[in-house]
Image (cartoon, rainbow, N blue to C red):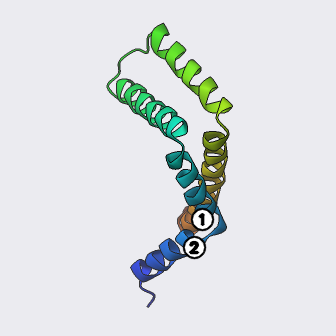
Amino acid sequence: MVNVYDQANALETALRESEEFQQMKDLYSKVNEDAESKQLFDEFRELQMTLQQKQMQGEELLEEDIQKAQNSAQEIENDENIKGLMEAEQKMSQLIQDLNRVIMKPIEELYEINNQ
């Protein structure tokens, strides 16, 4: 019988060695090496977490919050280091979504068989 956890650990290793992850890692280093990019990125992430926390607690986002988020997103778009990192994050996210579909396939097939 296959040990699923061994396979999961092998998948982790494969992800770490993937082109997508290596690109993210390199671009993240570039962001951290540039003081302006790093500060902008840290502020953006902090704002994101604050807004997510408000939403999870059921708080309504104020117009001021929305404006801050829009301004921050615009600043991010103008920073080539961060823009590159975010594009790499999107590629990695797509890869993870694809893997999730593969992982969930047996369960989806099981329920499809039982629904026929």
Q: Earlier in the sequence, mark 1 or mark 2?
A: 2
Q: Is residue 114 visible?
A: no
Quadrant for the N terminus in the image: bottom left
Furthest toward the left, the residue is 57
Whether residues under marks 1 and 2 lie with C-beta atoms below 8 angstroms apart, the answer is: yes
Q: Secondary structure at mark 2?
A: helix
Point 53% across, 65% down: residue? 107
Q: Relative to 10, is 61 above or below? A: above
Q: Residue furthest top?
A: 63
Q: Residue at x 49, y 79 (%)?
A: 10
Residue 28 on image: x %, y %: 54, 52
Disc 1 packing (10 Å; few <14; some 14–19; many ≥20): some
Q: Residue at x 53, y 54 (%)?
A: 29
| Label 2 Cα crowd, 10 Å radius (few <14 / some 14-19 / many 20+) | few
Secondary structure at badge 1 equals helix
- Report the residue marked by disc 2: 17
Residue 82, position in %: x, y?
Answer: 60, 41
Q: Is residue 1 visible?
A: yes
Residue found farthest to the bottom: 1
Percent position of residue 102, x then y: 61, 67
Q: Position of residue 12 (x, y in %)?
A: 48, 72
Q: Which mark is residue 62?
A: none
Q: Residue at x 45, y 87 (%)?
A: 2
Answer with the quarter of the image where residue 100 lies: bottom right
Kindly report the distance in space between the C-alpha atoms of the residues bearing marks 1 and 2: 7 Å
Q: Which residue is mark 1?
A: 22
Q: As displayed, is residue 76 above or below residue 91?
A: above
Q: Is residue 99 left or right of residue 10?
A: right
Q: Quadrant of the C terminus?
A: bottom right
Q: Which residue type carries mark 1?
A: Gln
